[in-house]
Image: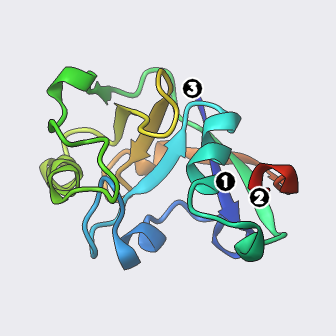
Amino acid sequence: MKVYRLSRKQFADPLSGKGAAIKGGRWNSTGVELVYTAANRSLAMAEVAVHLTLATLPDDFMMVTIHIPDDMPVKEIPEGNLPSDWKDFPHPASTQRFGDSFVAENRYCVLKIPSVVTQGDFNILINPNHKDIGKIGVTAMEKFPLDKRLFK
């Protein structure tokens, strides 16, 4: 399976989850490492774009293509099994506890979860501390400037 991550150049590699651990995110608390990726490039872009304005738009984005082996077990969570407030903004503590539990259980390296930003798409979350992380790797990194028309 190919998944995608839009990242500033200086944070594009390795897949450490340290950036997410600094501030936390929808699916992890501060201090919990998790790598956020998307099932397609458009979703990777949308997940980043919702946090930007034209004034804060960097010019050094890289689209990172990541290979997850097809035989790697993936924990898939249907929308009905998520906390009832999972789509709320700002993100609620319930979703952070949900992701923190996934990391703490350490049963799976990969979690497939519905996207809040794009209905019908999926985020693929990677636990960088799982024993199988070495089987997942970056296969490509390419410059990916965002079109400024998105921010008018």
Which is more toward the observer, 114 or 67? 114
Q: The residue tagged with tag 1: helix, strand or loop?
A: strand
Quick one: quadrant of the N terminus?
A: top right
Q: Please state the horizontal and vertical placement of residue 43, each as a whole percent of the image.
A: 61, 37
- The residue pinned by badge 1 equals 6
Q: CA distance from mark 2 to mark 3?
A: 19 Å
Q: Is residue 40 left or right of residue 20?
A: right
Q: Please state the horizontal and vertical placement of residue 104, each as a whole percent of the image.
A: 15, 55
Q: CA distance from mark 1 to mark 3?
A: 17 Å
- The residue pinned by badge 3 equals 1
Q: Please state the horizontal and vertical placement of residue 80, each as a whole percent of the image.
A: 19, 22
Asked if the residues shown at circle 2 and circle 1 are in contact, with their CB atoms under 8 angstroms apart, the answer is: yes
Asked if the residues shown at circle 2 and circle 3 are in contact, with their CB atoms under 8 angstroms apart, the answer is: no
Whether residue 4 is visible, yes or no, is: no
- Residue ID at (79%, 56%): 152
Q: Is residue 108 above or below residue 8?
A: above
| Label 2: few (<14), some (14–19) or many (≥20) C-alpha neighbours in 10 Å | many
| Label 1: few (<14), some (14–19) or many (≥20) C-alpha neighbours in 10 Å | many
Q: Is residue 142 above or below residue 58?
A: above
- The residue pinned by badge 2 equals 62
- Identify residue type, mark 1: Leu
Q: Is residue 122 left or right of residue 112?
A: right
- Identify residue type, mark 3: Met
Of mark 2 and mark 1, the one earlier in the sequence is: 1
Question: Given this view, does label 2 or label 3 mark the residue nearer the observer?
Answer: 2
- Residue ID at (58%, 64%): 14
Question: Given this view, does label 1 or label 3 mark the residue nearer the observer?
Answer: 1
Q: Is residue 135 above or below residue 2?
A: below
- Residue ID at (37%, 76%): 23
Give residue 16's mark: none
Of mark 1 and mark 3, the one earlier in the sequence is: 3
Q: Is residue 82 left or right of residue 9?
A: left
